[in-house]
């Protein structure tokens, strides 16, 4: 049986907040394979969001390496910007830039130098997958926080990245939108590697692997939700 390709890898990754001098990541070694759903979980302040920002290239490794498909992204400055990697921020308002929904979702694919026809097709495909076609005529200022999260996610999907990073994607979702996002996460692994920072048990259930971060280190890795759930009873 062929071994699955490693899509994302961190080697001895360290990060200290330059302002507070707090050590946030303390030697994180992680391997994530292509077309896996991996959840990174842990208490608030354990380093989940900072780890995702390193995987996206927003934060450079102070010590250690981040490899995407075997390439050190610090040595390949285009890796995070040539649409291999898409990151949904914890606060979706941080990535809503345009006054109308269509312009916001189409911004990423427009920067890929695609034709207007392809951009239009991608915007529609992303909106259909999230069941947000009804938002296309809306102004972004009129959206709820959950709707902004879905629009931001649609913008990422429209770029068709290889790797999708989701930072607490449950933020602002209601009883109607949650099932759509859970279904989408499961479907994404057909064409993408998906890495999610969350403590939401419904989302954790979707994972092929669950990584527990504790004080900036990987404390444990679980092969499935049942194994993770058993650990909670100890």
Image (cartoon, rainbow, N blue to C red):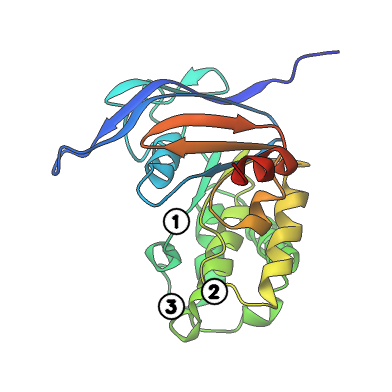
Image quarter of residue 181 = bottom right
Q: Which residue is mark 3?
A: 99
Q: Which residue is mark 2?
A: 146
Q: Is residue 11 above or below residue 234?
A: above
Q: Residue at x 47, y 79 (%)?
A: 140
Dot 2: element: helix
Q: Is residue 184 left or right of residue 76?
A: right
Q: Mark 1 vs mark 3: which is more N-terminal?
A: 1
Q: Is residue 142 above or below residue 191?
A: below
- How far apart, in angstroms, are the residues tagged by discs 1 and 2? 13 Å
- The numbered mark at residue 89 is 1
> CB under 8 Å between callouts 3 and 2?
no
Dot 3: element: loop
Quadrant the N terminus occupies: top right
Image quarter of residue 133 = bottom right
Q: Mark 1 vs mark 2: which is more N-terminal?
A: 1
- How far apart, in angstroms, are the residues tagged by discs 3 and 2? 17 Å
Dot 1: element: loop
Q: Residues within 10 Å of mark 2 (few under 14, many from 20)?
A: some
Quadrant the C terminus occupies: top right
Image quarter of residue 38 = top right
In this view of the protein, can residue 173 be seen by the observer?
yes
């Amino acid at each position: 049986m062929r071994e699955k390709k490693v899509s994302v890898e961190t080697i001895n990754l360290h990060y200290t907040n330059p302002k507070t001098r707090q050590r946030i990541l303390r030697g994180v070694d992680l391997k994530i394979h292509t077309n896996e759903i991996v959840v990174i979980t842990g208490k608030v302040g354990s380093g989940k969001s900072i780890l995702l920002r390193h995987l996206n290239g927003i934060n450079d490794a102070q010590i250690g390496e981040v490899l995407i498909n075997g390439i050190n992204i610090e040595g390949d400055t285009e890796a995070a910007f040539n649409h291999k990697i898409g990151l949904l921020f914890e606060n979706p308002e941080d990535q809503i830039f345009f006054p109308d929904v269509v312009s916001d979702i189409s911004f990423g694919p427009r920067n890929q130098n695609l034709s207007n026809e392809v951009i239009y097709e991608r915007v529609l495909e992303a909106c259909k997958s999230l069941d947000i076609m009804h938002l296309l005529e809306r102004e972004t200022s009129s959206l709820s926080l959950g709707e902004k999260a879905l629009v931001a996610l649609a913008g990422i999907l429209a770029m068709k990245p290889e790797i999708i990073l989701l930072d607490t994607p449950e933020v602002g979702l209601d009883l109607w939108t949650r099932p759509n996002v859970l279904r989408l996460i499961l479907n994404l692994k057909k064409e993408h590697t998906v890495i999610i920072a969350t403590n939401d048990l419904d989302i954790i259930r979707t994972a092929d692997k669950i990584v527990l971060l504790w004080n900036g280190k990987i404390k444990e890795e679980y092969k499935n939700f049942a194994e993770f759930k058993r650990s909670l009873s100890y």
